[in-house]
């Protein structure tokens, strides 16, 4: 499908992350609220019988426009059983690595407990970064090739492929979800960076979205503004734009707070939009390992892993 068809161990240093914000800017578990529809984006063909996954599979390489690109793969215990498994693709931040993202999030532990595959693509460049302004970017092509390759190696349920990411990786998760709604069932950006015209690469179809952002974030300002002389969207503005794209009739409606986490849910949507404003946290993964005061600190009031996985389970692609 083309983009226009219908329907981190601990975080890097403050200086590195602030540079990330500048460069990116220059480039541009709670139940659903009452009456929230469970519909999602367009469907794919139900999975055919398959044969599990190699027990020793931990890394794959694919060729993209003449370059070799890599991703770390984690399969849960029992992955050799020929039962189609969900897949969560998680994108690291600017200057990050797959191992840093895992150290920050501990997604492998969640995958082992719940039985899903985690794929951690690695960005190109030095420092590493994702490029998503162009719908024909090499990074989006990398995601396409990676999914195609993995589907030949692992017994993946194509109705349960999801994306998440941190910081610049959150923007990448946003991009693959909006531009490839026939492959990704739902997305979950955390502390993401959003260019004002992020919807330019979208297919225009509704996609279930859950997002998180700390109000004290010194790297990606919660209220938006400028970085490097270029504008960036505020976190709630980004969520509201998703609500518009998803055809939501009302909201945001505040749900009961969970510690310093304030859930905001839109209603009457073709696909749900849920957003968590974390008032006492900064550039961090809620419930994760990063509690660096220079990054604004973190919060343990909610677990992003738990909320994200609960959301993903409720929103597969539907026939």
Image: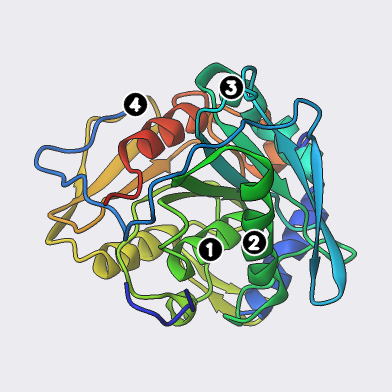
Q: Secondary structure at mark 4?
A: loop
The label on residue 258 is: 4
The label on residue 39 is: none
Residue 239 sits above or below residue 201 on the image: above
| Residue 160 horizontal side relative to residue 51, left or right | left
Residue closest to the eye, 118 or 310? 118
Q: Residues within 10 Å of mark 2 (few under 14, many from 20)?
A: some
Residue at image position (58%, 26%) is: 111
Mark 1 or mark 4: whose residue is earlier in sequence: 1
Residue contact between numbered discs 4 and 2, judged by CB atoms under 8 Å = no
Mark 4 or mark 2: whose residue is earlier in sequence: 2
Q: Residues within 10 Å of mark 1 (few under 14, many from 20)?
A: many
Mark 3 or mark 2: whose residue is earlier in sequence: 3
Residue contact between numbered discs 1 and 4, judged by CB atoms under 8 Å = no
Q: Position of residue 193 (x, y in %)?
A: 57, 62
Residue at image position (19%, 66%) is: 247
Residue closest to the eye, 193 or 161? 161
Q: Position of residue 64 (x, y in %)?
A: 78, 70
The label on residue 81 is: 3
The residue carrying mark 2 is 143
Q: CA distance from mark 2 to mark 1?
A: 8 Å
Q: Is residue 123 visible?
A: yes
Name the front one of labels 2 and 1. 2
Residue contact between numbered discs 2 and 1, judged by CB atoms under 8 Å = yes
Quarter residue 100 falls in = top right
Mark 4 or mark 3: whose residue is earlier in sequence: 3
Q: CA distance from mark 1 to mark 3?
A: 29 Å
Q: CA distance from mark 4 to mark 3?
A: 38 Å
Name the front one of labels 1 and 4. 1
The residue carrying mark 1 is 176
């Amino acid at each position: 499908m083309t983009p226009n068809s219908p329907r981190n161990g601990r975080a890097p240093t403050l200086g590195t992350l602030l540079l990330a914000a500048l460069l990116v800017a220059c480039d541009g578990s709670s139940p659903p609220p009452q009456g929230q529809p469970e519909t999602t984006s367009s469907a794919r063909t139900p999975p055919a019988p398959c044969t599990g996954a190699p027990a020793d599979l931990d890394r794959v390489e694919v060729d993209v426009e003449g370059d070799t690109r890599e991703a770390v793969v984690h399969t849960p215990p029992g992955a050799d059983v020929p039962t189609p498994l969900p897949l969560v693709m998680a994108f690291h931040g600017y200057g990050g690595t797959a191992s840093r993202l895992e150290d920050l999030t501990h997604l492998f532990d969640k995958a082992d407990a719940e039985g899903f595959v985690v794929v951690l693509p690695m960005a190109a460049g030095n420092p590493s970064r994702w490029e998503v302004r162009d719908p024909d970017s090499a990074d989006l092509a990398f995601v396409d090739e990676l999914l195609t390759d993995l589907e030949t190696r692992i017994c993946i349920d194509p109705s349960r492929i999801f994306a998440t990411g941190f910081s610049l990786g959150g923007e990448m998760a946003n991009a693959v979800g909006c531009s490839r709604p026939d492959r990704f069932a739902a997305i979950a950006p955390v502390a993401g960076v959003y260019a004002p015209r992020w919807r330019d690469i979208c297919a225009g179809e509704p996609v279930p979205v859950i997002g998180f952002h700390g109000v004290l974030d010194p790297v990606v300002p919660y209220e938006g503004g400028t970085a490097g002389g270029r504008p960036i969207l505020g976190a709630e503005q980004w969520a509201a734009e998703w609500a518009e794209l998803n055809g939501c009739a009302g909201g945001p409606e505040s749900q009961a707070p969970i510690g310093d986490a304030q859930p905001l849910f839109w209603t009457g949507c073709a696909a749900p939009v849920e957003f968590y404003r974390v008032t006492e946290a900064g550039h961090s993964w809620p419930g994760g390992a990063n509690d660096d005061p220079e990054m604004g600190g973190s919060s343990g009031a909610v677990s992003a892993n738990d909320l994200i996985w609960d959301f993903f389970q409720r929103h597969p692609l539907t026939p």
